Image (tube, grey):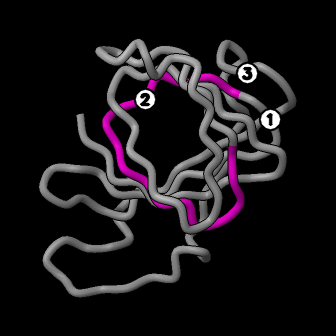
Amino acid sequence: MSALLPHGHNFTIPVGDVDVELEAVDAAEVVAGGPSQGAAELGTIGGAEVGVWELRDGTVTDTEIDEIFVVISGGATIELLEVPGSPEETGRVIEVAAGDVMRLVAGTRTKWSVEDHIRKVYIAGE
């Protein structure tokens, strides 16, 4: 799939209209419900990937990569299950909703609980 925001061009897209193909979440990561998720790459900047990610209807676990994201619709409850180098953050619960910006540190184990959906624009690196 080609990036929706071509490198080297001044360009805009309505992020709410970006088509994100949803697939069932791997059963090993499902805690509750029948969640589905998907991502669409928008492009890259400075070696970091930029994209839209969506999760619907359930609770899942994940191991994060280094990322900053902006919630554009919906919301989630994110529990920090394990935070490398910051054990005092373990167990912290964060509510995110449209308009919120969050940083996730690589290696952090999380649990995402989503009643309806969350859609975010992310910038992620290794």
Residues packed near mark 3 inside 10 Å, few (<14), some (14 to 19) or many (20 plus): some
Magenta residues, dominant SS class: strand
Residues rendered magenta in the picture? 60-76
Q: Which residue is mark 3?
A: 30
Front position among marks 3 and 2: 2
Secondary-structure class at tag 1: strand
Q: Is residue 37 above or below residue 10?
A: above
Q: Which residue is mark 2?
A: 64
Q: Nearer the viewer, residue 39 or 60?
A: 60
Q: CA distance from mark 3 to mark 2?
A: 15 Å
Question: In the displayed structure, does residue 80 sit left or right of residue 36?
Answer: left
In magenta stretch: residue 63: yes
Image quadrant occupied by the C terminus: top left
Q: Could you tell me residue 95's position as x and y percent?
A: 65, 46
Marks 3 and 2 in Cβ contact (< 8 Å):
no
Which quadrant would residue 9 be assigned to in this image? bottom left
Marks 3 and 1 in Cβ contact (< 8 Å):
yes
Residues packed near mark 2 inside 10 Å, few (<14), some (14 to 19) or many (20 plus): some
Question: In the displayed structure, does residue 13 sit left or right of residue 113?
Answer: left
Image quadrant occupied by the N terminus: bottom left
Q: Amino acid at mark 2?
A: Glu
Looking at marks 2 and 1 on the same chain, the residue that comes earlier in the sequence is marked by 1
Q: CA distance from mark 3 to mark 1?
A: 8 Å
Q: Could you tell me residue 92's position as x and y percent?
A: 57, 27
In magenta stretch: residue 21: no
Secondary-structure class at tag 2: loop
The label number, if any, that marks residue 58 in the structure image: 1
Looking at marks 3 and 1 on the same chain, the residue that comes earlier in the sequence is marked by 3
Secondary-structure class at tag 3: strand
Looking at marks 3 and 2 on the same chain, the residue that comes earlier in the sequence is marked by 3
Residue ID at (43%, 54%): 69
